[in-house]
Image (tube, rainbow, N blue to C red):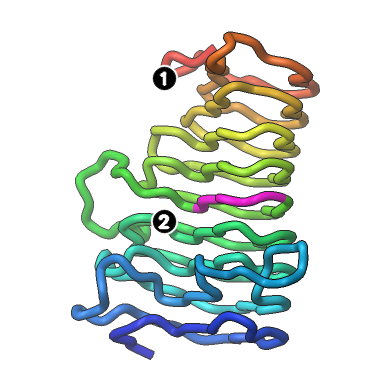
Amino acid sequence: YTVSRPLVVPMYVGNLRVEDGTLRASASFPPDEYLVVVGDASCDPPSGQASCNEYVDLSGVFLDARHVAAGGARLAHGMGATLRDVFVTGFNAVGVRLDGGHEVMLQDCWLAEYYWDEAHGGAPTRSVGVQINGNDHLLDNVIVFDYAHVGVQVNGAANVLTTVHTWNGGGVGIEVNAYQTRLVDCYLDYNLLRIAAPSETVVEDTFFLFTGAVLAAGADGAMADVVFRHNTFYGPPANGSV
C-alpha cells in the first residue's frame, strides 16, 4: 500500500498484529512523521510501568519511507511489543524509534537509509538506524547498512544488543549514551563504537573490523564497571579509534 499519512495504533490499544506486506510513503506524506506510529508521547497511565500500549507486533513488513517520511516506525511508551522480520528503508531521520516503554524487541530486522545501488551522496547523513530512548529493550539479529550516520543509538539504561551488525558506510556503528548497556556478539564493520560516560557497561564477544572503540569521559571524568572481554580486532582502525 502507498500511504499519505501514518498507520496509527492509538494509546490504550493492544494485543494486535500488523503482518506481511509493504507500506510505502507517498510524495505527500508528512516529512516529520513515521509510516507506523504506536502510542503517543503524552502517555500517562495509572500503572507504574508508564506504558499505554501492550503486545503490538509488526511481522514480515517492508517499510519504505522513500526519503520522504522521517522513518519507518515509532513506538511510544509501549511494553511487550515486537518488530520481527521487518525491513526499513528510505528514512530521513530514524528507521525505528523507541520512546520510553519497556521490553520492546527488534528481531531479525534490516535497516538501510539507502537500498543497495540507490543513488546517494556516498557519505553518511544525519540519520539513525535504530534509536532507543528508553530502558530495558532488546535488539537481536539486527543489521543496519548504507548510509545511516549512526547505526544504533542507545539513550536509555539497561538495554541489550546481541548479534547487531552495523556496516553503515563509516560514521558511528553503535553509540551508547547511557549506563547498564550490554553489547554481546555484535559486529562493527568499518565504523565506530562510541560510549559516552561509560558506566556498568559490557562489551563482549564482539568483532571490530578495521575499527575500534572510543570511550568519552563524563562530566566528572570518571568511568566505572566497564568490561571489555573476548573481543576480536582485525586490521588497523580507519577512523581514529583505539
Residue at image coords 52%, 22%: 211
Q: Crowding near pointer 2: few (<14 within 10 Å), some, many (20+)?
A: many
Q: Which structural element holds mark 1?
A: loop
Tell me the magenta residue range. 130-135
Residue at image coords 51%, 68%: 42
Residue at image coords 25%, 42%: 122
Q: Was residue 8 drawn as part of the magenta stretch in this picture? A: no
Among the 4 quarters of the image, the one containing residue 63:
bottom left
Up/down of 63 relative to 179, above or below: below
Query: Is residue 81 visible to the viewer in this orientation of the structure?
Result: yes
Query: Would you name the residue on which mark 1 appears?
Result: 239
Residue 199 percent coordinates (x, y): 70, 23
Q: Earlier in the sequence, mark 2 or mark 1?
A: 2
Q: Nearer the viewer, residue 129 or 134?
A: 134
Residue 156 percent coordinates (x, y): 62, 43
Q: Was residue 132 drawn as part of the magenta stretch in this picture? A: yes
Q: CA distance from mark 2 to mark 1?
A: 23 Å
Residue at image coords 61%, 65%: 77
Query: Would you name the residue on which mark 2 appears?
Result: 94
Up/down of 223 relative to 200, above or below: above
Q: Nearer the viewer, residue 64 or 57?
A: 57
Q: Amino acid at mark 2?
A: Val
- Residue furthest out toward the bottom: 1
Up/down of 133 relative to 199, above or below: below
Q: Nearer the viewer, residue 218 or 144?
A: 218
Q: Amino acid at mark 1?
A: Asn
Instruction: Please name which of the two marks, 2 or 1, marks the residue nearer to the observer.
Output: 2
Up/down of 114 relative to 18, above or below: above
Q: Which structural element holds mark 2?
A: strand
